[in-house]
């Protein structure tokens, strides 16, 4: 019977909550292992998802092997945000670790047996591990470095340090994003915030390469947040950021962008496209390009009054998905020189959405398809942000 183990795991949850503030980052896994081994768990491994979302790597100080997401049980648990039991003597329990819908990795626990109550207690333990990982991640470099498959460029270091979570969901809306190449991304960025009934989304692509473009985009994102937090409208944001870049740089530097505001109660979308490809709207399996009448000039090259003329207003329908992306997605080339293109993008989106994948998994698969198309050789940044209104997953 697992009843004593269930009660012991529940008691462990309380102790971890009480002691969370004094647990050092590198003590987290050893502490879990000691506590659970005393409860007859024979193995405890925390796997973190890597930056490319292609593999699951053991949390230090574990020295185990990484597990590929495609074609593995651990990967299926990660993809579906679920729980699975496998094997015998010991039985291995695989449980997704997530903060809301943002998937951080997978927890593996091995024991002679599990009943339903013990599985439920272990699911709660995984939820607490997620919160501990998030809080301790701010205090150590070990968790961050563990997720890297190779050295990260300085521009990418800046980028990943300033991004919001890759996915977020509540009853009213879901947001999911991805960037590649994970270890060299520099000029691309995204940002979002849900303020009451208003979701703000911005996606940016700064001119240039490496550190130069990263710093330009970082300034733009900071200016976007500053304008957003002051209550500026989409048009005002455009004009304020554009003026900042023109005042700051006199050499014609610019940032292409899309700025969007969605009323998550009524579904009204206000969109301003500054030099980007038009975002795509997925409605009842059909993909529509929201290019608008004409594209505003990129930030840093705009003209006073341009923003009002180029703003679009759309009425979303329940179940709609929006895909914002940078041109590195459609302009990606395969080794034979062929281009990914909008037609291939539309086809990939339609397949991902028809399979009913939630936004975070749909975006991961889309970026995986792009990487496979170009044989994982990246010559330009590529970013995706998907918004679903309203959210459907819990």
Image (tube, rainbow, N blue to C red):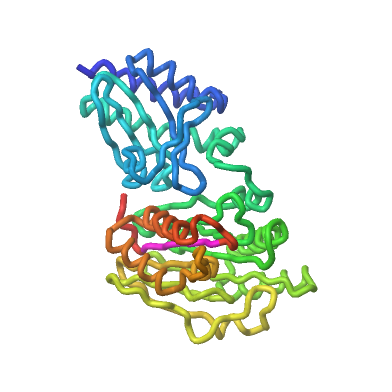
Query: Relative to residue 312, is residue 82 depicted above or below?
Result: above
Whether residue 394 sits left or right of residue 136 in the image: it is left
Q: Residue 251 appears at what percent x and percent y? A: 78, 73
Q: Residue furthest front?
A: 336
Whether residue 175 sits left or right of residue 161 in the image: it is left
In depth, the one of 161 and 242 nearer the eye is: 161
Q: Residue 143 appears at what percent x and percent y? A: 55, 35
* Residue 35 seen by the camera: yes
In which quadrant is the N terminus drawn? Answer: top left
Q: Which residues are magenta?
A: 382-388
Which residue shows up at 51% across the image and 55% down it? 376
Magenta segment: does it hold 387? yes
Q: Residue 32 appears at what percent x and percent y? A: 44, 22
In depth, the one of 303 and 105 nearer the eye is: 105
Query: Relative to residue 371, is residue 340 depicted above or below?
Result: below
Give the quarter of the image for residue 11: top left
Query: Relative to residue 191, is residue 76 depicted above or below?
Result: above
Q: Residue furthest right?
A: 250
Magenta segment: does it hold 37? no
Which residue shows up at 52% across the image and 67% down it? 333
Q: Residue 352 appears at what percent x and percent y? A: 33, 61
């Amino acid at each position: 019977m697992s009843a004593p183990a269930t009660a012991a795991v529940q008691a462990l949850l309380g102790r971890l909550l009480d002691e969370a503030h004094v647990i050092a980052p590198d003590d987290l896994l050893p502490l879990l292992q000691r506590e659970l081994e005393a409860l007859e768990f024979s193995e405890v491994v925390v796997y973190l998802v890597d930056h490319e979302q292609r593999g699951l790597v053991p949390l230090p100080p574990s020295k185990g092997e990484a597990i590929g997401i495609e074609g593995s049980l651990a990967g299926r648990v990660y993809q579906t945000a679920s729980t699975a039991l496998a094997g015998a003597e010991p039985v291995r329990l695989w449980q997704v670790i997530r903060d809301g819908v943002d998937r951080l990795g997978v927890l593996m626990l091995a024991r002679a047996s599990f009943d339903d109550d013990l599985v439920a207690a272990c699911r709660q333990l995984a939820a607490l591990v997620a919160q501990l990982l998030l809080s301790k991640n701010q205090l150590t470099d070990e968790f961050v470095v563990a997720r890297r498959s190779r050295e990260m460029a300085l521009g990418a270091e800046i980028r990943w340090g300033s991004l919001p979570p890759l996915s977020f969901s509540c009853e009213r809306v879901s947001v999911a994003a991805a960037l590649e190449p994970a270890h060299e991304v520099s000029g691309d960025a995204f940002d979002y915030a849900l303020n009451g009934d208003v979701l703000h989304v911005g996606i940016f692509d700064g001119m240039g390469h490496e550190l130069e473009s990263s710093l330009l985009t970082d300034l733009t994102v900071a200016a976007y947040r500053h304008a957003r937090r002051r209550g500026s409208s989409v048009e005002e944001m455009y004009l304020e950021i554009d003026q900042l870049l023109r005042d700051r740089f006199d050499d014609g530097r610019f940032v292409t962008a899309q700025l969007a505001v969605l009323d998550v109660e009524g579904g009204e979308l206000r969109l301003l496209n500054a030099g980007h490809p038009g975002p795509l709207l997925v409605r009842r399996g059909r993909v529509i390009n929201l290019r608008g009448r004409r594209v505003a000039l990129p930030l840093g090259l705009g003209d006073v009054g341009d923003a009002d003329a180029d703003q679009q207003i759309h009425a979303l329908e329940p179940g709609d998905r929006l895909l914002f992306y940078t041109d590195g997605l459609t302009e990606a080339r395969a080794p034979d020189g062929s281009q990914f293109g909008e037609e291939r993008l539309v086809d990939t989106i339609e397949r991902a959405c028809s399979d009913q994948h939630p936004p975070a998994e749909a975006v991961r698969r889309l970026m995986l398809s792009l990487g496979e198309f170009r044989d994982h050789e990246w010559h330009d940044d590529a970013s995706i942000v998907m918004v679903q209104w309203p959210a459907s997953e819990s």
